[in-house]
């Protein structure tokens, strides 16, 4: 078991290195330097600026310096936000993005599993068809459509419940108040709810038809006990390996959501950096996301191996 | 049983064989697809959108970048809301903040989105099928190395690399096709490889090899036609994924540049002005969502139609 985990960790390291290398050299392919501007600085100053950012050295040496600093957790200075390092900017955005993402995945898991199990227990009945067609909507409609439409519905036109106006704020973070989080979290969670519901329904239907569930029925266990104690455990296993990709999707989804709702998360910094051509910040965020996604995939794989006794560790 | 009886029996058999002859797998699948109501409706809707998109320059008197400052941010005629100006009879979907006709712009957005979808999918199709078929057919160590590479690429967060590409190369239109196509070929390669592995055990491949056909010839003439079924299904699911990717980039301001437009750009514009001009958001969203649904239903229908297990 331990050697399996170790092998997986060792396998992830080259992937991360490839990502860093690819991203670094792609950034350096960019025509023009980061400090080319309209005004002409004296050649001496330009040389000094280049030297300060190591831009006067050959590219392989720059790469080595970057890697070396990365090892020490230093992502370098931001080219455009002069007083900040990339690390500081990421640290500033991380709590916002993490809060949104965690809330979304928690809601998605709760609702998704509940809907999926309900659909499976009523296979080919009205409830099943209803849930699955709603799930089809959730999967097909992209978040940059749901986000503005939901905002239009709940934010702009407002919603009157019991005579009181409960319309939600259209944008802004406002220190992470619940009211401000509802819409973004809803947009992030919707497609995940749909995907998880489909996944759980599929595996649950399969499990319910398996022999050991029939045995449990034959023993005369109550159907509640069969579902919660016997079927659900096996049916939820595929979810574990889906969690890695789910987090990755949430990360890309948050690019859109943070942009629309103007939330100060990592995704918004990333988009702004991409538009401003702040190369070091883009590079830093890509590496951060990549490391995060790889780590979660790794975690999901190892967790799966621990939970599922049928997986052999020798692969 | 007399001799004449046998003769008429075999004649009947021959007639029946003639009846059956014209029905290949594809004709069969096509007929099954036509029985799927959702798929047929989707094909009609999608066909209509495609025809409208192709004919867009001739359908309206306005061009996609013509700015009429007399009717900026005006609602369509039938939009009865006090305080909002009326765009007049010829702007069917209203106008945007620069007085451009939204109907024409939505259709031009459809042109770009559908074109990106088709071309990038074609790119991914060619790379994926060639790569997957080669890996699956050659097998052994070559297969191991080739698929290991796919595994590594699979774990890269590719949308970020596309974004880097768009940043570095300044929203290059053609690069967009290539970048998205290059992202989408991985799954295609995996599907084709899996199919190829199972097909290459079949007798007709052995027969072809015995007849002296070379590896390339076998891949081209025997393997690829046989993996076409699952590939076609995956293509219909890749096109909406590509359209989504393009719109995603355009929405963030990293895709198509003004005045040319795509659904992503239009939705981004509409989002910015949804409080005053909701029609700018609703029409592009409706077209895009309808298209995505159509592709999904057609893909599902094709999967059912081409799956030999259901016969």
Image: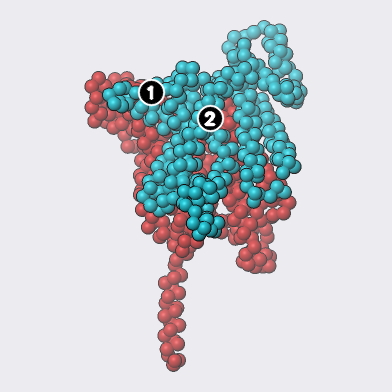
Chain colours: A cyan, B red
Q: Quadrant of residue B95?
A: top left
Task: Using the image, tell me which numbered label, if any, was put on residue B112.
Answer: none
Q: Which residue is mark 1?
A: A168
Q: Secondary structure at mark 2?
A: helix
Question: The residue marked by circle 2 belongs to what chain?
Answer: A
Q: Residue visible at 42% across and 85% down?
A: B8
Left or right of A91 in this view: B39: left
Left or right of A126 in this view: B156: right
For the residue pair A38 and B240, the one nearer the viewer reads as B240
Disc 2 with disc 1 on a shared chain: yes
| Rendered location of residue B90, percent (x, y) | 27, 31
Task: Using the image, tell me which numbered label, if any, was put on residue A102.
Answer: 2
| Rendered location of residue B29, percent (x, y) | 45, 59
| Rendered location of residue B204, percent (x, y) | 62, 66
CB-based contact (under 8 Å), mark 2 and mark 1: no
| Rendered location of residue A308, percent (x, y) | 62, 47
Distance of label 2 from label 1 (alpha carbons): 21 Å
Question: The residue marked by circle 1 belongs to what chain?
Answer: A
Q: Residue furthest bottom?
A: B2
Quick one: label 2, few (<14), some, or many (20+) residues within 10 Å? some
């Amino acid at each position: 078991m331990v050697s399996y985990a170790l092998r997986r960790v060792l396998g992830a390291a080259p992937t991360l290195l490839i990502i860093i290398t690819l991203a670094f050299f792609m950034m350096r392919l960019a025509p023009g330097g980061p400090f080319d501007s309209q005004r002409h600085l004296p050649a001496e100053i330009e040389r000094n600026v280049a030297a300060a950012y190591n831009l006067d050295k050959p590219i392989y040496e720059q790469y080595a310096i970057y890697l070396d600093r990365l090892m020490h957790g230093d992502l370098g200075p931001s080219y455009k936000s002069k007083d900040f390092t990339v690390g500081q900017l990421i640290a500033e955005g991380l709590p916002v993005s993490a809060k949104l993402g965690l809330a979304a995945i928690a809601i998605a898991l709760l609702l998704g599993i509940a809907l999926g199990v309900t659909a499976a227990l009523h296979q080919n009945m009205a409830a099943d068809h209803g849930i699955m067609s709603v799930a089809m909507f959730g999967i097909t409609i992209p978040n940059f459509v749901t986000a503005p439409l939901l905002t239009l519905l709940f934010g702009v036109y407002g919603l009157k419940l019991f005579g009181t106006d409960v319309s939600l704020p259209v944008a802004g973070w406002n220190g992470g108040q619940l009211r401000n989080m509802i819409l973004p979290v809803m947009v992030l969670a919707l497609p995940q709810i749909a995907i998880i519901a489909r996944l759980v329904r599929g595996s649950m239907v399969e499990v319910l038809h398996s022999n050991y569930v029939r045995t449990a029925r034959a023993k005369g266990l109550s159907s509640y006990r069969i579902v919660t104690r016997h079927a659900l455990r096996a049916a939820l296993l595929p979810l574990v390996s889906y969690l890695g990709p789910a987090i990755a999707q949430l990360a890309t989804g948050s690019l859109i959501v943070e942009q629309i709702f103007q939330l100060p998360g990592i995704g918004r910094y990333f988009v702004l950096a991409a538009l401003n051509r702040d190369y070091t910040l883009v590079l830093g965020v890509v590496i951060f996301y990549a490391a995060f996604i790889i780590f979660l995939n790794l975690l999901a794989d190892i967790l799966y191996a621990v939970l599922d006794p049928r997986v052999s560790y020798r692969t | 049983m007399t001799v004449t009886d046998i003769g008429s029996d075999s004649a009947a058999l021959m007639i029946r064989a003639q009846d059956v002859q014209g029905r290949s797998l594809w004709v069969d699948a096509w007929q099954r697809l036509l029985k799927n109501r959702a798929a047929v409706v989707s094909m009609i809707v999608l066909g209509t959108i495609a025809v409208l998109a192709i004919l867009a320059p001739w359908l309206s008197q306005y061009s996609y970048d013509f700015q009429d400052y007399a009717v900026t941010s005006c609602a369509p005629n039938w939009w009865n809301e006090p305080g909002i100006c009326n765009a007049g009879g010829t702007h069917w979907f209203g106008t945007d903040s620069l007085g451009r006709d939204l109907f024409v712009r939505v259709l031009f957005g459809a042109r770009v989105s559908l074109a990106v979808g088709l071309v990038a999918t074609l790119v991914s199709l060619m790379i994926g099928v060639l790569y997957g078929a080669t890996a699956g057919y050659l097998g052994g160590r070559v297969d191991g190395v080739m698929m290991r590479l796919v595994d590594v690429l699979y774990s890269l967060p590719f949308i970020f690399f596309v974004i880097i590409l768009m940043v570095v190369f300044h929203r290059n239109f053609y690069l967009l096709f290539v970048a998205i196509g290059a992202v989408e070929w991985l799954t295609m390669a995996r599907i084709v490889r899996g199919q190829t592995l199972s097909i290459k055990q079949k007798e007709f491949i052995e027969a072809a090899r015995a007849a002296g056909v070379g590896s390339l010839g076998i891949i081209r003439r025997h393997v690829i036609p046989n993996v076409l079924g699952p590939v076609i299904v995956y293509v219909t699911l890749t096109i909406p994924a590509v359209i989504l990717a393009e719109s995603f980039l355009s929405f963030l301001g990293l895709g198509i540049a003004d005045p040319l437009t795509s659904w992503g750009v239009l939705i981004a514009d509409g989002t910015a002005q949804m409080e005053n001009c909701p029609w700018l958001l609703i029409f592009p969203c409706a077209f895009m969502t309808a298209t995505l649904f159509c592709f999904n239903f057609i893909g599902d229908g094709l999967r059912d139609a081409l799956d030999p297990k259901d016969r």
